[in-house]
């Protein structure tokens, strides 16, 4: 089975090691954001994608989550 975003081997549930790490970072950052402001998961993901400083791996994961409508778990 390959990663949902790239062709790498899956190491986590659906992502390869790099995308899995990016996914964990996204979730962690969201929990921090949520403490500071009232923001929904999907709005947060869109901000990540729109941010020109977002790294490649994080952006790819965020786009995937939006496309599939996957909520935070
Ligand atoms: Zn991947």
Image (spheres, rainbow, N blue to C red):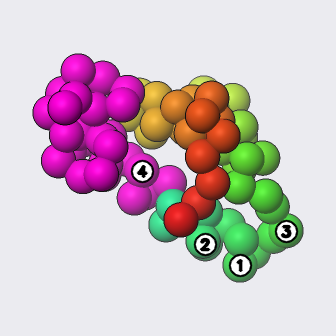
Q: Is residue 44 left or right of residue 20?
A: right
Q: Are marks 1 and 3 in contact (CB under 8 Å)?
A: no
Which image quadrant is residue 6 in? Answer: top left
Q: Which residue is mark 2?
A: 32
The disc, 4 or 3, on the residue closer to the chain's N-terminal end is 4
Q: Secondary structure at mark 4?
A: helix
Q: Is residue 63 visible?
A: yes
Q: Are marks 2 and 1 in contact (CB under 8 Å)?
A: yes
Q: Position of residue 45 (x, y in %)?
A: 66, 44
* Disc 2 from disc 3: Cα separation: 11 Å
The magenta-colored residue range is 1-26
Left or right? Give the position of 13 relative to 70. left
Distance Cα–Cα, label 4 vs label 2: 14 Å
Q: CA distance from mark 1 to mark 3?
A: 8 Å
Residue 35: numbered disc: 1
Location of mark 3 (residue): 38
Q: Position of residue 21 (x, y in %)?
A: 30, 51
Q: Quadrant of the N terminus?
A: top left
Q: Residue at x 60, y 71 (%)?
A: 31
Residue 35: name its quadrant. bottom right
Report how far apart the C-alphas of labels 1 and 4 lie in the structure.
19 Å
* Quarter location, residue 40: bottom right
N-terminal-most mark, 1 or 4: 4
Q: Marks 2 and 3: CB-CB under 8 Å?
A: no
Give how far across and how far down residue 73 sits, in percent: 53, 65
Question: Closer to the camera, 58 or 3?
Answer: 3
Residue plotted at (46% across, 29% down): 60
């Amino acid at each position: 089975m390959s990663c949902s975003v790239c062709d790498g081997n899956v190491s986590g549930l659906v992502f390869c090691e790099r995308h899995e790490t990016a996914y964990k970072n996204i979730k962690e950052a969201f929990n921090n954001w949520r403490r500071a402001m009232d923001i929904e998961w999907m709005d947060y993901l869109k901000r990540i994608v729109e941010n020109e400083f977002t790294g490649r791996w994080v952006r790819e994961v965020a786009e995937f989550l939006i496309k599939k409508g996957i909520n935070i778990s």
